[in-house]
Image (cartoon, helix red, strand yellow):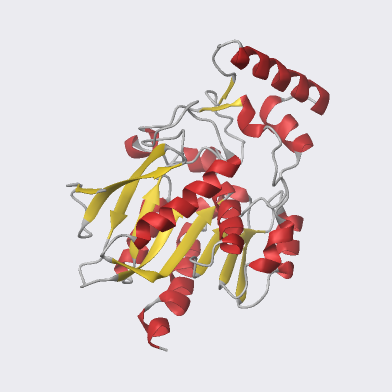
Amino acid sequence: MSTSNDTGLHLSNQLDVEFSSGGVVLRGWLRTPPTPGPHPLIILAHGLGGLKEWTIPEVANSLVESGFAALAFDYRNFGDSGGNPREEVDHAGQIEDWRNAITHATMLPEIDSDRIGLWGTSLGGRNVLAVAALDPRAKCVVVQVPPISLDVTMTALAFTGAGVDEFYRVLAEDRRERASGNDPRYITFEHDDPDAEHADYWATFGKAEQRNWNRRLTLRSFEPALGTDIMFLMRDIAPTPLLMILADADTSGRDQLAAFEAAGEPKSLLMLHGHHYSVYTEHKEQAIAAARDWFVEHLGQRAAAE
């Protein structure tokens, strides 16, 4: 359903939206331009533990100014959406969240259901690649710095400081504890390292970005799951137009380039100088402009008339 939301935005028309995904109520917002509809739509969601308040409003502003509607949502277990355990990344469930967001969009009278694009960043970009390969309702996609293969060794070291054997041992303990009715184990991010790649990005967060940010993820968010490597899906995205926005010092760079090579046409690559979080900081405006222009070219009024 959709209900009015008075946000005081300079852009007209924002509605709160909610829809069901796997029995969980997901919540977000829909922005539409002041021109008559139905409008082409871009659906947006963030990455690992990311919320709809992070970066997405600025991308949506640019899209709405270019004649698109923009729908943003929080994944299950995060932000304003329902679901438990809180702050647990459900990898398969997030892909279903995207597909159910598309379904919801096709039921909105102000949306042109034949012109729906997807924008995802980091893990959200990975989700978008999977959805684009599986769901022909996605007509155009933009992904930023998506991880292609989720490496358990890297995960163990980066998020727990443990080796792989210790990581699996603690995961097994967490499963036993949950089966006994105890709360899940969490990894917390309370102490920011000023030298960490994410530090400059997190430093930009104001009240809106921090409203639903609990600075934690469940340990099981990092557990290996089916679909650890989505390289095999890349060939199935074409003929959906694909723009990949990458950073040359991203730790996933080699896999990302291989994924781009595996994808069919039409496709385009924007390589920026920097690390994983540079697309949100020093290169933010360039990344937003590239995404907007890709959607205008392949999903806008001109493309629809051709």
Q: How many marks?
A: 0
Image: 261 above or below 229:
below
Residue at x-position 36% and y-position 64%: 62
Q: Nearer the viewer, residue 192 or 148?
A: 148
Image x and y of residue 231, in percent:
73, 58
Residue 58 in view (yes/no): no
Q: Residue furthest right?
A: 165
Q: Nearer the viewer, residue 80 or 108?
A: 108
Residue at x-position 52% and y-position 58%: 283
Q: Is residue 151 left or right of residue 31?
A: right
Q: Residue furthest front?
A: 23
Residue at x-position 31% and y-position 49%: 29
Residue 241 in view (yes/no): yes
Q: Nearer the viewer, residue 252 or 240?
A: 240
Image: 265 above or below 230:
below
Q: Is residue 195 left or right of residue 292?
A: right
